[in-house]
Image (cartoon, rainbow, N blue to C red):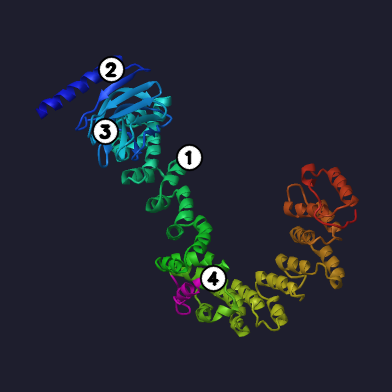
Amino acid sequence: MRGSLITLVLMLLSASVAAADGACAAGRECSVLGVTPPAALPPSIVFRAEVAKSDASASVAVPREGITVVGITAEASSGALPTQIRLSAGAHAFSLELGPKVERASFELPPFVAAEAIQFAFRAAAAPFTLTVHTSDTPEALVRALAGRGDERLRAIALLPRLGSKAVDALEAAFETLTPRERRDALKVYARLARDPRARARLIEASTDADPEVRAWVADALEGAALVEAARRGSAEAFAKAARTVPEQAFGLALERLAGEPPYAEARKVLRTLAEAIDADALLVAIAAVPPVVRARAVEPLVESAALRERLLSPLTVLLEGAQAPGEALDDEAFETLYRATRASAAYSEAMREPLEPSLLRLTAAHEWMLRAAAFRALGALGAAREVFTAGLADPYPRVRLAALAALLESSDRGEVDEVFRALAKDPFPLVRAEAVTLAAREGVLVGAVDDRSPRVRLAVLTSWLGRDERAADLDKALRRERRLDVKGGFLEAAAARCVPGFERTAQQILEVAGPGQDEAASAAALSYLLAFEGETREAWIRALEARGVPKRTLEGPPRCRGKIAL
């Protein structure tokens, strides 16, 4: 008897649906009987509405692209469903007949397109239940639709993510056969399903795509470890997001980049910002986990931040303690480690000298002159005692002597330095003599010989006399005697930079003597000097220079200095 009843219900359902196929036209309500257990509706996108007890209506929103409805399932959480559910969507309407005491029922419907919300009405619900709208949009059909054009393709992109892992199954099965455009569309779907490991893998693979738009929405879709992996592969967009959302992992990535080949500019650019954003302990753990040379590459730019300097004192001290015995040559990596660590030490003040000074003192006797020079500069910044620099002032390498001099001047224990200037102004190397003259002038001490055999030194001496009234006559004579136009040109550059008038005759002589295509730097310096000062005389100079054939474009631009010069 029970088997006959089920058969009868199924026959009634088939007859009802068949009738609906031919007679259920838009604008007419069709009556459809329910089946329990549910009919075998195909796996597809579904839409649900939760109905509370005593509700008399419900609504299911559909995407603007529309859906093709093929069935409805109603299921009560406890108790029975309403005996009738009325469905309407635009011009389509159905009456779903359930009968008494039914807890779950499915209805196959003649397919219709719903492009707006689906409305349900029923007698007041005796118990909460769920309404599920089944569609004909299977994963495979939607993947095939990616090959279409216009609305069909856009609809597939919008609806596939609603299928979750089933969409990923279908996309993965077809991925190798998709065209480049279809793969791009597939990636848009993956971006909305990034919780699926297969979708994440595809997104990570696409994170360095040539198209910046693809890179941008891939980075936007990824989170956590997947985002970090995309950044590790070189996605700038992923790295930027990681820096905002997971700064500790992004800091680790920046350290990894420092472990690679130079240049390191891009990694160093963000390193400080990331270091300031993360916890102090996390910073130290991350730095301690990388090799010493990478640690040194990181510490060097980070100590420029006052907020980070104290935190980094301990790892920097450890790096410096790796200094070799005096005079022992270093391999490339050891040299780079110590050199960068030594340079970083110069960022510290006298208050932090104690842990750094012993290692830096050892490095003043290093085999490599660059290490010795860097050590002296750091010791100067740390305010080391004057006697520390004595050996450096007599170092066999000229740049070390200069570094020791600059460090001595910076040290708080510098003492009297005039004799040091005078001694170095007679150094065998022109580089040292010229720099000694320049540094001495900044201290108000005039040293050096204006008839030095080196043009570099003569230029330094002439420049040191600028603005010194007691040397005005000597300066005029020296400029008259000077034969090298590059020396005169360099002097005029300094005079123009300091807006010191009175040397227009020297500038005019350069322009008269310099041959076409020759001494271009000196000629340019002379022109710049003559045009640096405001007033009527400047305009007269412009006219005079134009008359000499100087191109007008080189005479354009506003004056830099107040005050006038003679014509």
Q: Secondary structure at mark 4?
A: helix
Q: Amino acid at mark 1?
A: Glu
Marks 2/4 in contact by CB < 8 Å: the verdict is no
The residue that mark 1 highlights is 213
> In the image, is 130 to the left or to the right of 526?
left
Q: Please tell me whether residue 420 is drawn above or below residue 46 in the rendered image.
A: below
**Mark toward the start of the polypeptide (1 vs 4):** 1
Q: Please tell me whether residue 379 is drawn above or below residue 455 in the rendered image.
A: below
Q: Amino acid at mark 4?
A: Arg
**Mark toward the start of the polypeptide (2 vs 4):** 2
Give the class, few, some or many, for how many residues have Cα within 10 Å of label 1's Cα (few <14, many ≥20). Answer: few
The x, y position of residue 240, in whole percent, is: 49, 51
Q: Nearer the viewer, mark 3 or mark 1?
A: 3
The residue that mark 4 highlights is 309
Report how far apart the C-alphas of labels 2 and 4 lie in the structure.
Answer: 79 Å
In the picture, the quarter occupied by the N terminus is: top left
Is residue 59 in sight in this rendering?
Answer: yes
Q: How many marks?
A: 4
**Mark toward the start of the polypeptide (2 vs 1):** 2
The residue that mark 2 highlights is 21
